[in-house]
Image (tube, grey):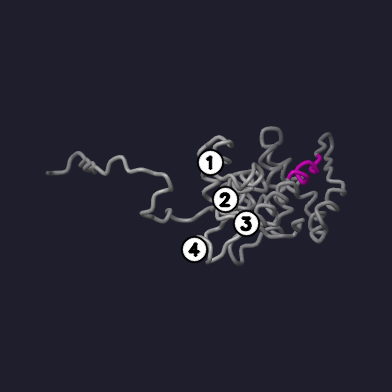
Amino acid sequence: MPAVAEMLKPTEAAVVSRVSLRDVNRAIDERILPEAFVSVDNGRHVLAGACSFISFYFETAKRLTSEERLFAIRTVESKLTRARGLAWAALLREDWTVRDEFLTIDLRPFLKNTSDRMSDLEASREMVTSSSDVLGGAPVIRGTRIPVYDVAASVAADHPIDRILEAYPSIDVEKVRLASIYAEANPLRGRPRATGDLPEGSVIVSDRRVPRLRKAGRSS
């Protein structure tokens, strides 16, 4: 099981918190997260356990004021600090109820969801491997030559799951799900590498080139 104290990249924290990358950066920049749960020494990183606070803050925005949400986070801050060395199962046995006059907030469901998503993230990491001997080191699904980003791209393009499994018969539904999680947590940077190779079975119908239209206002 992944450690509560693991430090996650912002993209990983976004996956575990189920919020946007922008919201993770907001949580850091606006000090929504206590400084003890954030590291900026070698790139931005967020404590895995604190992702539950990010999730709580943004998911309850329509029901609680900012002050109420921050109060809840500050109230249990010390408890998470003390529990950093615990496993998630032990963490979930703690009482995460916050009370303030008439207001009662239970943060345990947010920690449980974070724990589940950390398990998914770890499973996606274990599923993916890379070697210079296989597809030039591109990340592939373990035991196959299937690029994990190709599978994730099919999911992102809303291809039906049966079509994806037909295209990649050596994987199953769970591996397709984990491929999407891995790609979201580790997004590719820059433009895709250009290649002159066509996918197997492709046929060139026409190689006619269409001239680019000139912008209005330019002299001929």
Question: In what element is the residue under mark 4?
Answer: helix
> Whole-Å distance between the Cαs marked 4 and 1?
24 Å
Q: For the residue marked with disc 3, what is the amino acid? A: Gly
Q: For the residue marked with disc 4, what is the amino acid? A: Gly
Percent coordinates x, y for residue 8 in the rendering: 65, 57
Instruction: Pick whichever of labels 3 and 1 is earlier in the sequence.
Output: 3
Please state which of residues 111 and 102 is positioned toward the viewer in this rendering: 111
> Whole-Å distance between the Cαs marked 3 and 4?
16 Å
Instruction: Pick whichever of labels 2 and 1 is earlier in the sequence.
Output: 1
On screen, residue 117 versus residue 169, left or right, reads right
Instruction: Pick whichever of labels 3 and 4 is earlier in the sequence.
Output: 4
> Whole-Å distance between the Cαs marked 2 and 1?
10 Å
Instruction: Give the residue drawn at x 86%, y 53%.
Output: 90
Instruction: Give the residue drawn at x 79%, y 54%.
Output: 80
Question: In what element is the residue under mark 1?
Answer: helix
Residue 136, label in figure: 4
Q: For the residue marked with disc 1, what is the amino acid? A: Ala
Which mark's residue is nearer the viewer, 4 or 2? 4
Which mark's residue is nearer the viewer, 4 or 1? 4
Q: For the residues labelled 2 and 1, say whether their Cβ atoms are less than 8 Å apart.
A: yes
Quarter assignment of residue 164? top right
Quadrant including the C terminus? top left
Q: For the residue marked with disc 2, what is the amino acid? A: Ala
**What residue would you read off at disc 2?**
183
> Whole-Å distance between the Cαs marked 4 and 2?
18 Å
> Whole-Å distance between the Cαs marked 2 and 3?
18 Å
| Magenta segment | 106-113
**What residue would you read off at disc 3?**
143
Which mark's residue is nearer the viewer, 3 or 4? 3
Residue 111 among those drawn in magenta: yes
Residue 112, label in figure: none
**What residue would you read off at disc 1?**
156
